[in-house]
Structures are given as C-alpha cells and as structure tokens.
Image (cartoon, coloured by chain):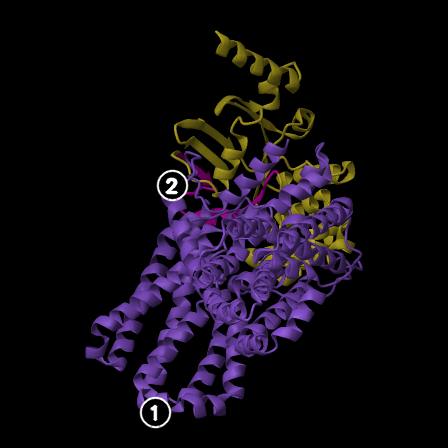
C-alpha cells in the first residue's frame, strides 16, 4: 500500500513537468527533465548565492568570538523561516484541498497514511528550500574552520535531514490553523491572501533590514545568545551540536522527532474531519432580480477575473509582481529624497546608463507576474465548457492575456512613474522606457500562454500543481530571464555604438515583432490547438 | 440535423472509432449505446467539435464541424458524462456566463432560467458557489445551462447520471418536448430501459464499429433492447474467440 501511495504521489508530481502526447499517450523524455533540472539549478544557484553572502558576513566574526553555535542557530532560523514560508500554503492546498481526498478516504487506507504521503512531498519542498540556506552556511563554515572532523560533516548531513521536519511541523500547525480558521470565513480567499501578504511583508522587512540585523547580531552577541536559547531552544541545541557537542545534537534530534511525531498525530487525528466537513459559512439564497447581459469578450474577461479572484493560490503565486511593483513604487516615492541624496550623482553623471538599468529593473519587476503560464492548465477538467461553446478560441486565449495586462499594467505605470520621479530621464528616454516595459509585459503574457499551450496540465488534483510546480510556469519565467539576458548581451556588443535611444528603439521594434509573431501563431495554430486540447 | 459520415478516429495506432455513419433527423430522439470504451464518448466529442478526427465528416444542419465549428456550436448544446463546472462561480453567474456567450437576450434568459431552475428545484441554490453543490445539483445546473439558449440539437453523454428520479422524469419530458418542437437529441446511455422507452431510434456501437442502428422496432424486433444488446455483445465475443 505504501509503495502504491508513493508511486501515485510521484506520478502526480512528475505529471506537471512532462508533456503527454495525446495520440500515443507517451510522456516527453529525458530532454525535458534535463532542461527543467537545469532551470531549477539556476534558480537555486541565484538564491543560494544570496544566502552565501549572509553566511560570509556572519561566520568569521561569530566563529572568532567563540559563538560558532550562534552562527548555525541563526542560519538554521533563516532556513526554517524560508521553509515555512515556502510550504505553508502547499500544506493547506495539498493536504486539505486535494481533489482526490474523498477517493483516497473511501479506500481502506488509514488517514494517517494519506497524511504521511502528502507530507512527503511537502517535506521534499522544505528540504529544497532549507538546502538553499544550509549548504552555503556549511561551505562558509568549512572554509572558516579548516581541518573540521568528519563527525561535524556527518552531523551536518543529519541536520539537513532533520531540520526540515521541524519547519514542516511548524508549517503544518500553521496550515492546520489556517484550514480550521478559514472554514468559518465567508471569503476564504481574501483571508488566505491577507495572511500570505502579511508573511511576505514581514519577510521583506527582515530582508531589507538584514544589514541592520547582522550588525545587531555581531554587536549584541551575548544578549542575542540568551534570546536564541530561550525562544528557539532546538536551534540553540542544533548550533551547539554542529560545533562539536554531540549530546546537544542528540537533544536537538530528540526534540525534532518528538515535535514532528506529535504534529503528525494531531494532523492524522483531525484529517478526516477537516478534509471532509463542509465549512460553516452562511448559505446564500437566490432571490432573483434583473439580469444583465454582456458581450462575449466581456463575459470571458469577467470569467477570468472571477477565477483569479476566487483562487488565493493563483493570486499569490502568479501575481507577486503586482505586490512587488506597488511596494517598490511606495518605497521610491517615500524615499526619493534620500535616494537622490545618496546616489543622485550617478543619475547626473551617467543618465543614459541609469535609464537602461532602470528599464532592465522594470522589465524584471513586471516579469514577476505570471498569470498566463498556468491559465490554460487552470481550466482543468472544465475545459470542455469553453471548447464546446460557439466562441472563437482566440478570444478565449486573448481574455487570458487581458487578465495578465489588467493585473500588471496599472502597477507597472505606478512604478514607472516612481522611477521617473527619482531618476528624471529625458522625455525621449522616458517614452522609450515606457514602450519597452509595456511590450515586455505583453511578451510575458503571450509567451506564458504559448508555453502553457505546449505544456498543458489539465488533470490536476490541486491547483497549486498547475500553478507553482508546472513546467509551463518554470519555462515562462526562464523566457523572461532569457529575454533580459539577450538584450543585455546585445547591448554589451553593440549598445555603446548605437547609444541608448537607438538601442531602446531597436529593442522595442524587435519586441513588438516577436509579440506580433507569437500572437499570429496563437491566432492561427494556438487557437486550433486549444479547441481540441 | 446531425449527419456523421464515415467518421474515423485513431489514437496512435489504435482505431477508436471506425467508419461510423449516422443520420439524425429533426424531431428524433436518438440513443447511442455500447459497452465501456466502445467509442461513444469519442464520437460525441467529435460531434461537438472538441475532438479532432482523422477521416470522415460531421455536419450540423448541413454545416461541417471541421469547416465552421463556431456556426455548428451555436446550434448545439453539449453535456459531458461528468460535468465539471466552474467552482469559482455561483450557479446564477455560471448560467449568465453561458447565456452571454450564446447571446441570449435578457428577457429570454430570465424566462428560461426561471422555468428550468423551478422545474429542477434549484432556484434557491443559484446564489450558492458551485463548489458547494452536490453532484446531482451540478448535473441539474449543467442541464439548465444546456437548455438556456434553446438549442436545436442536444448532444449528451450519460445525461441521467446523478439525477434524482423526479428530475430524471422531468428531464425526459423536456427531451420529448424539444423533439416535438423540431429539435433533435443524440445521447449515450448505459440504461437500456431508458433508451427503449424514450428513443425513436437507437445505434449500437461495439469496439468502435457501428453494429446496428435504426428505429427501435428495427433494432429490437420482438425482443427487448437488453436482450438484443447482450446477444450482439456475445456474438462479438464468440467471433473474437473464433
């Protein structure tokens, strides 16, 4: 039974990455897997590098002052927080909202085993996120303390296996509370979005004040040690263990296993109730009233907006760029004086380079929105509705592009205005930046949809697999990065000869041509493909 | 109304439906029966333009589904065997969405939604999210949405699954009314008694091949539809063993 459940979970996980040939039923081969692995490694490399910087700043002074354990405790804390943030909504979606819960519960499988299997994939995700922090931490430590005993390496490997259990246990409790709390909410999605945004704001506040906190750690080592010991005792013991105290490591192991077991028992005991009981929301009764008619385009757009508004998973994973843009705009508007006083001279001496960098940053920010990459997969098993209706499939595809534009263009305009207030480029450069950024937004929307048409995943059990873990989402993000890379490369080769105005103008023409080409493909071939997906 | 000519559909090397031809006239209630995996859903989906096919032609009121799928889809309503609807909409939002796409006027949609939702006792639940609907309620909503634009041709895959006896009875009456008004209905079913009592004509498909079709009398003769169906199934199996 365990093997069958594991195989089912693995198949579900892999299905989102592989394209299945409708005619032969075979899935795409090793090439796709290698490509996805390369993309994932690249993304992990980028985040790993960021944590390497933090580890490099913390390790030498703490080790020198004999507080090596505090270094590991702090890195462990970061790993745990990252792991919790990365999987808390996966826990809720994959454990409590999976569409096959009823099917599995109807089989002679103890609920505990279903929970165990579901948590297995969440554990893998937390492990991945914790490795981003812990591997750089160990690399810096090994370099700082030469001649480390093999035991330390072994204990580190054990830590890497155990620590995600702790993060997962906390994420599970929070996810369980969210599931419990949201059952009584009339608007569960709004509740989930607000909670997640709160998490994100806290995360970024910590991130932006990282330097201050690092200084605080280095200057207040003694008082911080006491706080770590009091509030995150397991991490204190983990830190001691990783710096050579075997007994402390055993205590850390014991605490982690006991906490994980207790949380597992709590979830297993309440799973049946939480996964199957209907929410206690008030029933709405239809009382009639006049109906409004709408055009086909409007009806399709309204449908897309309802889908977007109705799924916190979709909002949180596909339109983070909107939040980033609003945040960046607020920061730039509020701190414009400070920014200009600190680095205003750069804007004065290098106005053209400043404009190009600003344009690249705007493209990167707007590229964080990925509403079209999962848009077709999200139709899921209800795709028959649109397919069987008398509507041009291109109109359906266009409504998905429009959703991306509606959610991305307004915050993009806001952040562009903020950037222009700060860097004050000339009118021509300003217009060109606007043009390139807007075309980049269109490129992201059309490219995402095109990739999703090539890699649709309609047979999902929970939305998050179609949104967060699909090949289309990864490739779409890669497309945005690749575009930025190619544009930067072209500038490095011929940009200086052309000058920023001609360069941006050419970039806009090329982008417009690529977008037009992709739209023509969508209209001619993509629409036909969508009609019979 | 619906003309299927030499329809053939292959999945890779496997022939799912082979050279199937059928003609459904206005006013006819046409049953489509066969064992699981016989090719019923594959045929039905092709008739609705949501599955491409390798050979043959399908015409809706003289228009080829391949040449002008949108014109064809305007005249039909399709109901799959397991209607997955938009969970993020309420019942009334879904019905309005379908009505908007089919261009149903305000007065017509108000009258039809009121008529059919009262008939299926779903009016009070229309403000609820579809997510909260039971399987039967979803089936009723899908039926109402299929009837909202007054289609000339109804194509349905196992339409009675999930319906309670009362709703089932009411829907059968509605099907008859549609055909009496000159519409046509082509539907698959496993419930042979339903097909026998309800249909004017019936077609039996086995392993992708149409083995018998015609009026109920032509197909069953003096026997029951069930015995004819089982006999044909048995004959096919013996043929396969030989």
Give the farthest residue toward the left: A497
Which residue is depicted at the point 60% across and 45% down?
A120
Q: Nearer the viewer, residue A100 or B48?
A: A100
Which residue is depicted at the point 41% across and 50% down?
A36
Q: Estimate the x, y position of residue B36 in percent, counting from the top left.
A: 58, 26
User: Which sits earlier in the primary sequence, circle 1 or circle 2?
Assistant: 2
Q: Estimate the x, y position of residue A340 in percent, counting from the top left.
A: 44, 91
Magenta range is B56-81
Q: Which chain is yellow?
A: B
- Numbered mark located on residue A348 in the image: 1
Q: Which chain is purple?
A: A
Crowding around mark 2 (Cα neighbors within 10 Å: few <14, some 14 to 19, many 20+) is few
Give the farthest residue toward the top: B242
> Which SS class for mark 2?
helix
Q: Nearer the viewer, residue B41 or B227?
A: B41
Q: Quadrant of the N terminus of chain A?
A: top right
Is A171 colored magenta in this rendering?
A: no
Looking at the image, can residue B37 be seen?
yes
Which residue is depicted at the point 54% across and 34% down?
B41
Letter of the chain that mark 2 sits on in the rendering: A
The answer to whether A210 appears left or right of A32 in the picture is: right
Q: Estimate the x, y position of residue B115 in percent, counting from the top left.
A: 73, 52
Label pair 1/2, CB-CB below 8 angstroms:
no
Letter of the chain that mark 1 sits on in the rendering: A
Is B63 colored magenta in this rendering?
A: yes
- Numbered mark located on residue A30 in the image: 2
CA distance for labels 1 and 2: 52 Å
Looking at the image, can residue A392 be seen?
no
> Which SS class for mark 1?
helix
């Amino acid at each position: 039974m365990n093997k069958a459940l594991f195989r089912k979970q693995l198949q579900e996980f892999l299905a989102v990455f592989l394209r299945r040939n409708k005619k032969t039923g075979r899935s795409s081969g090793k090439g796709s897997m290698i490509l996805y692995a390369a993309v994932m490694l690249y993304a992990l490399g980028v985040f790993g590098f960021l944590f390497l910087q933090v580890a490099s700043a913390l390790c030498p002074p703490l080790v020198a002052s004999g507080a090596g354990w505090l270094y590991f405790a702090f890195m462990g804390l970061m790993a745990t927080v990252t792991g919790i943030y990365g999987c808390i909504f996966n826990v809720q979606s994959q454990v409590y909202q999976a569409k096959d819960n009823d099917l599995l519960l109807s089989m002679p499988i103890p609920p505990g085993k279903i929970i165990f299997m579901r948590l297995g994939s969440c554990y893998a995700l937390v492990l991945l996120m914790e490795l981003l922090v812990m591997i750089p931490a160990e690399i810096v430590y090994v370099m700082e303390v030469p001649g480390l005993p093999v035991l330390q390496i072994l204990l580190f490997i054990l830590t890497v296996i155990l620590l995600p259990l702790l993060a997962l246990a906390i994420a599970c409790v929070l996810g369980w509370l969210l599931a419990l709390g949201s059952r009584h909410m009339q608007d569960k999605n709004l509740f989930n979005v607000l909670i997640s945004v709160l998490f994100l704001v806290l995360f970024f506040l910590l991130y932006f004040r990282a330097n201050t906190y690092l200084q605080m750690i280095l200057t207040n080592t003694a008082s911080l040690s006491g706080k770590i010991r009091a509030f995150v005792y397991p991490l204190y013991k983990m830190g001691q263990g990783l710096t050579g105290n075997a007994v402390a490591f055993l205590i850390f192991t014991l605490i982690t296993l006991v906490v994980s077991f207790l949380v597992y028992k709590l979830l297993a005991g309440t799973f049946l109730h939480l996964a199957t009981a209907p929410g206690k929301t008030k029933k709405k009764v239809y009382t009639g009233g006049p109906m409004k008619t709408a055009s086909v385009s409007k009806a399709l757009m309204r449908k897309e907006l309802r889908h977007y508004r109705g799924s916190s998973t979709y909002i949180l994973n596909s339109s983070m760029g909107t939040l980033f843009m609003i945040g960046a705009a607020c920061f730039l508007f509020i701190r414009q004086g400070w920014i200009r006083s600190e680095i205003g001279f750069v804007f004065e001496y290098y106005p053209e380079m400043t404009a190009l960098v600003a344009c690249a940053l705007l493209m990167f920010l707007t590229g964080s929105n990925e509403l079209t990459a999962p848009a077709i997969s999200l139709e899921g098993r209800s795709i028959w509705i649109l397919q069987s209706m008398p509507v041009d499939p291109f109109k359906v595809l266009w409504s998905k592009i429009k959703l991306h534009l509606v959610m991305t263009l307004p915050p993009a305009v806001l952040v562009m205005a903020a950037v222009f207030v700060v860097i004050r480029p000339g009118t021509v450069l300003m217009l060109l930046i606007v043009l390139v950024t807007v075309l980049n937004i269109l490129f992201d929307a059309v490219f995402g949809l095109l990739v999703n048409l090539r890699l649709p995943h309609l047979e999902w059990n929970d939305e998050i697999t179609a949104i967060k873990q699909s090949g289309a989402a990864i490739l779409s993000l890669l497309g945005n990065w690749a575009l930025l890379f190619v544009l930067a490369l072209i500038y490095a080769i011929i940009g200086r000869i052309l000058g920023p105005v001609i360069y941006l103008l050419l970039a806009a023409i090329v982008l417009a041509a690529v977008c037009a080409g992709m739209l023509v493909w969508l209209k001619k071939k993509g629409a036909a493909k969508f009609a019979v997906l | 109304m619906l003309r299927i000519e030499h329809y053939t559909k292959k999945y890779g090397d496997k022939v799912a439906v082979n050279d199937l031809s059928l003609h459904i006239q206005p006013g006819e209630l046409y049953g489509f029966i066969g064992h699981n995996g016989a090719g019923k859903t594959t045929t039905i989906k092709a008739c609705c333009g949501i599955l491409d096919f390798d050979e043959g032609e399908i015409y809706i009121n003289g228009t080829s589904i391949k040449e002008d799928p949108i014109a064809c889809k305007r005249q039909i309503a399709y109901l799959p065997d397991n209607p997955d609807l938009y969970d993020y909409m309420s019942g009334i939002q879904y019905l309005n969405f379908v009505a908007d796409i089919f261009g149903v006027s305000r007065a017509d949609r108000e009258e039809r939604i009121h008529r059919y939702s009262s008939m299926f006792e779903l009016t009070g639940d229309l403000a609820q999210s579809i997510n909260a609907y039971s399987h039967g309620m979803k089936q009723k909503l899908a039926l109402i949405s299929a009837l909202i634009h007054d289609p000339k041709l109804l194509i349905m895959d196992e339409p009675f699954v999930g319906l309670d006896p009362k709703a089932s009875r009411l829907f059968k009456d509605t099907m008859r009314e549609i055909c009496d008004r000159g519409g046509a209905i082509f539907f698959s079913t496993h419930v042979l008694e339903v097909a026998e009592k309800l249909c004017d004509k019936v077609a039996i498909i086995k392993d992708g091949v149409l083995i018998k079709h015609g009026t109920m009398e032509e197909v069953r003769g003096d026997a029951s539809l069930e015995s004819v169906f089982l006999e044909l199934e048995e004959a096919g199996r013996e043929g396969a063993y030989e």
